[in-house]
């Protein structure tokens, strides 16, 4: 049994007040209804692990008790504790439902719990080890050689961000670049930027992992090391803007890196840039997409960074496309189940969460689900038994008329 | 005969009981892992943290029966929790044992539009119930809980909300309850006791026993199903706020006597300025700003009817009362400003309730709520204010983190039964971060409870456990024969004292 914690650097001490003051109101568990009525009681749960495992510990409220137990030494690590802690996707649903009422942020406690678990040598979980080793050896979590990162860009005439001084760095992210099923997205995204006349370049093989997954798993020291390395490189480029299509990368570049060093560049997500390009007429979606689609908000793009409108503006600009909102959308969006190392450690659970999302999309009458983040896309595609899962970039590219070789 | 003391040596059998319960609910739905049990050990109250030994999540009534029978064989405590929300220690297992987390039993079984009832399992939450009911032009009375609170247990434990002056308190809405008794058998209250006669009569045959279960906090059994009355959602509604700058609460009481007896409002309650501001907004700074626009005392009323004309007539009637009592009507622009902030205020008041917003003072919001008569409100508030001065005036509260000034106690008045009585809620604020704050809060709380009891106030919901800070600790010794009889009934119905032992401060054998 651990002793009463006296470690002044214990991450839990930073969030002790949240842990002790949870009023057990359960607002963290369900979508907030104060914005109006909802139609279907099947889609009111907010927390994937809570909905699946149901015990209090799987919800944010129960994690406040776990934090209290670890701080006071009443609780020691167990397989169950780590399961409850690491099936959380850190989607932030608890945060968006609790904070407006209470001023508390239960997600901060979860983050601190994971950092404490890493400090105590209980995490990363064995299932996470290959991911960490891959980052160490290859600079990406996918155990892929560095040179593969730039394979998609061959013969596209894209500037080298280090040598050619573009205004914009297109930061591709590991997942889009290294998942063979997704790398076409980068090609299409780059073609969209080229068509719109954006002066951009890429880092190619030199691009490093942003560290998002490492941070979400709780290894802050490693994340900070990766972030510093990245910041040094990014600052050296002299770009005015960094754009990325990955929700995870966007979230850490935009929200976490500035905590380490004030950036000299602006960070935007690709949907923001593309929405502006569509609005300005630089991109003209003219090809009809005769489909009823629903949009899945990636947590790191939506709840973490508040980007809800640009993807919808893009979709609404595509002729023929009918956008239907799911009951759980925007800050009420149900997480796909992939994030924060969950898909790596608990693939079955991640798949279950994705199936829930696809079920909601189907019940909503959508013919396909569209999203704007590679993790969500991977996980939702993997769980789909018929519902088409698309990404917004390929959809726009199709309508604008770019694509192919 | 008094309640038998709980046999704590039963703890030695936890392993055996766990295996048996696994056989009932399956391995996934029961555990004794401390990482799970600690999640049921504490809430927002002064109640000391206590863990259950086992947490089980049954899926249906049959599983509850089986678990209760197992507990009965071993003499192990059973503490039920429906939506597992209570801000007064109501779900904390006083003697450990099995925590029956009923959240998997969350189905609406029937909405009977014609007879205006809803039949539901214990973990159906207000948010779900109201949204489903509204589709049929109905609503369940919300006793000032958040949308995540359970409807059935909130009704059973006498929740009180804004429509209480007209429709009564929680148990007044109950048609029938189904309980798993301590021997595992099923008991239905009301006419539901007779198969085929469900819903036709609230009272059971002969002496009605349903009252035994009101505010029983699980001491007689596990409630597994409830039929409650629901009410028509008016076609047209209007919210008005009558306001009064003076501290004189007698004027507020007089106003409420008239408003409630003329019976033209569906919902009404009284909020003081600061409480109102927290109710209205999600932001403390904006809340503080709102206080400037709002006089000290505010009576919120909602009038509804079939059409605009009917509601307009009620508005005129209300206006006459406002003028007659020297109140003023809150300017429409301020009502509009509040509407901009929180949307449909009627919906907010009727359905959602925002009590949890006040807990944004980081869990430091504590309440002393009790029943009294409207004519006692003013005196009690003055006494309460004096007590707060005594306990907090010299407190260095600014070093307490994120708390509201503790001596600025507030009052919430909820008329009941056409003004015959009132639920008075006296609020105070401490910080759980600071031991001096907690110490002062406890001393203040005890003094406040005694003050209320000495003044003829009555705590009808003595939630907490024996020996903790709660209303029952001080009230029960004054109850005499009533308390003794309750203890005897408990001993008869639950001879091994397995159901929620340690609750309600019942007289214990040999104590």
Image: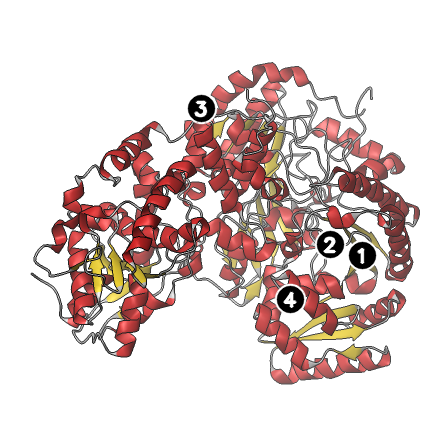
Q: Are marks 2 and 4 on the same chain?
A: yes
Q: Are marks 2 and 3 in contact (CB under 8 Å)?
A: no
Question: Between disc 2 and disc 3, whose residue precedes?
Answer: 3
User: Residue at (15%, 60%) from the top-left corner?
Assistant: A158
Q: Are marks 4 and 1 in contact (CB under 8 Å)?
A: no
Question: From where the camera sits, is residue B217 visible?
Answer: yes
Question: Between disc 3 and disc 1, whose residue precedes?
Answer: 3
Q: Position of residue B256 (x, y in %)?
A: 81, 68
In this picture, is B255 found above or below B427? below
Q: Are marks 2 and 1 on the same chain?
A: yes
In the image, taking residue B186 as reference, residue A259 lies left or right, namely left
Pointer 4: residues within 10 angstroms few (<14), some, or many (20+)? some
To which quarter of the image does residue B178 belong?
Answer: top right
Q: Are marks 2 and 3 on the same chain?
A: yes
- What colouring style does the render use? secondary structure
Disc 4: host chain? B
Pointer 3: residues within 10 angstroms few (<14), some, or many (20+)? some
Q: Which residue is mark 4?
A: B286
Q: Which residue is mark 3?
A: B23
In this picture, is B24 found above or below A264? above
Label 2 to label 1: alpha-carbon separation: 8 Å
Q: Which residue is mark 2?
A: B404
Q: Position of residue B25 (x, y in %)?
A: 45, 30
To which quarter of the image does residue A286 belong?
Answer: bottom left
Q: Are marks 2 and 4 in contact (CB under 8 Å)?
A: no
């Amino acid at each position: 049994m651990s002793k009463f914690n006296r470690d002044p650097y214990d991450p839990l001490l930073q969030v002790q007040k949240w842990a002790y003051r949870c009023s057990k109101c359960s607002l963290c568990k369900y979508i907030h209804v104060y914005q109006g009525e909802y139609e279907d009681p099947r889609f009111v749960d907010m927390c994937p692990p809570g909905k699946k495992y149901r015990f209090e510990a799987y919800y944010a409220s129960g994690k406040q008790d776990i934090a209290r137990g670890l701080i006071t030494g009443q609780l020691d690590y167990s397989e169950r504790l780590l399961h409850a802690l690491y099936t959380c996707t850190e989607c932030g649903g608890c945060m968006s439902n609790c904070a407006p009422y209470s001023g508390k942020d239960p997600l901060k406690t979860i983050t601190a719990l994971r950092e404490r678990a890493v400090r105590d040598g209980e995490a990363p979980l064995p299932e996470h080890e290959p991911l960490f080793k891959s980052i160490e050896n290859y600079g990406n979590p996918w155990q892929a050689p560095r040179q593969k990162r730039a394979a998609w860009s061959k013969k596209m005439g894209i500037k080298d961000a280090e040598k050619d001084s573009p205004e914009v760095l297109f930061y591709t992210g590991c997942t889009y670049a290294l998942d063979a099923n997704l790398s076409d997205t980068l090609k299409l995204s780059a073609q969209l930027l080229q068509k719109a006349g954006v002066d951009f370049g890429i880092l190619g093989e030199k691009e490093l992992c942003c560290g998002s997954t490492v941070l979400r798993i709780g290894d802050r020291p490693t994340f900070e090391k990766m972030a510093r390395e990245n910041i040094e490189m990014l600052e050296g480029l002299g770009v005015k803007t960094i754009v990325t299509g990955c929700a995870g990368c966007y979230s850490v570049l935009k929200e976490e890196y500035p905590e380490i060093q004030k950036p000299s560049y602006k960070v935007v997500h690709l949907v923001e840039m593309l929405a502006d390009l569509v609005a300005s007429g630089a991109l003209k979606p003219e090809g009809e997409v005769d489909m009823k689609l629903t949009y899945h908000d990636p947590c790191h793009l939506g709840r973490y960074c508040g980007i809800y409108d640009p993807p919808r503006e893009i979709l609404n600009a595509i002729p023929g496309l009918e956008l239907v909102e799911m009951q759980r959308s925007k800050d009420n969006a149900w997480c796909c189940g992939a994030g924060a190392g969950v898909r790596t450690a608990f693939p079955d659970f991640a798949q279950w969460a994705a199936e829930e999302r696809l079920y909601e999309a189907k019940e909503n009458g959508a013919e396909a689900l569209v999203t704007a983040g590679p993790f969500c896309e991977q996980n939702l595609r993997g769980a789909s038994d018929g519902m088409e899962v698309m990404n917004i970039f390929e959809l726009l590219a199709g309508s604008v008329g770019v694509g192919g070789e | 005969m008094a309640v038998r003391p709980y046999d704590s040596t039963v703890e030695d059998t936890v392993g055996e009981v766990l295996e048996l319960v696994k056989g009932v609910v399956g391995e996934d739905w029961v555990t004794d892992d401390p990482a799970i049990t600690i999640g049921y050990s504490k809430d927002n109250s002064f109640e000391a943290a206590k863990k259950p030994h086992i947490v089980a999540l049954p899926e249906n009534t049959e599983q509850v029966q089986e678990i209760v029978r197992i507990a009965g064989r071993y003499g192990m405590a059973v503490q039920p929790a429906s939506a597992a929300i209570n801000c007064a220690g109501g779900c904390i297992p006083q003697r450990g044992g099995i925590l029956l987390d009923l959240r998997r039993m969350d189905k609406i079984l029937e909405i009977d539009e014609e007879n205006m009832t809803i039949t539901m399992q214990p973990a159906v939450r207000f948010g779900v119930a109201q949204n489903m009911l509204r589709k049929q032009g109905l609503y369940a009375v919300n006793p000032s809980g958040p949308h995540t609170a359970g409807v059935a247990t909130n009704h059973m434990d006498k929740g009180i909300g804004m429509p209480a002056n007209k429709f009564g308190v929680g148990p007044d809405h109950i048609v029938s309850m189904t309980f798993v008794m301590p021997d595992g058998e099923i008991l239905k209250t009301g006419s539901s006791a007779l198969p085929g006669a469900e819903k036709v009569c609230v009272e059971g045959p002969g002496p009605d026993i349903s009252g035994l279960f009101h505010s029983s906090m699980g001491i007689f059994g596990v409630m597994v199903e409830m039929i409650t009355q629901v009410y028509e959602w008016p076609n047209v509604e209007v919210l008005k706020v009558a306001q009064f700058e003076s501290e004189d609460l007698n004027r507020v009481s007089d106003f409420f006597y008239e408003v409630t007896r003329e019976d033209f409002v569906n919902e009404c309650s009284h909020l003081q300025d600061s409480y109102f501001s927290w109710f209205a907004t999600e932001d403390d700074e904006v809340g503080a700003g709102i206080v400037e626009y709002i006089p000290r005392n505010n009576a919120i009323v909602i009038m509804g009817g079939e059409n605009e004309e009917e509601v307009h007539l009620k508005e005129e009637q209300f206006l006459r009362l406002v003028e007659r009592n020297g109140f003023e009507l809150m300017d429409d622009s301020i009502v509009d400003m509040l509407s901009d902030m929180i949307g449909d205020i009627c919906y907010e008041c009727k359905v959602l309730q925002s009590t949890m917003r006040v807990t944004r003072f980081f869990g430091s919001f504590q309440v002393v709520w009790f029943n009294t008569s409207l004519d006692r409100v003013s005196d009690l508030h003055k006494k309460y204010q004096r007590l707060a001065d005594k306990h907090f005036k010299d407190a260095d509260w600014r070093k307490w983190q994120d708390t509201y000034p503790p001596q600025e106690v507030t009052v919430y008045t909820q008329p009941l039964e056409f003004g015959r009585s009132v639920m008075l809620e006296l609020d105070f604020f401490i910080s759980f971060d600071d031991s001096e704050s907690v110490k002062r809060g406890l001393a203040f709380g005890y003094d406040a409870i005694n003050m209320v009891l000495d003044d003829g106030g009555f705590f009808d919901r003595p939630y907490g456990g024996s020996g903790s800070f709660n209303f029952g600790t001080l009230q029960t010794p004054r109850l005499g024969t009533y308390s003794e009889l309750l203890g005897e009934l408990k001993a008869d119905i639950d001879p091994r004292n397995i159901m929620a032992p340690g609750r309600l401060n019942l007289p214990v054998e040999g104590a």
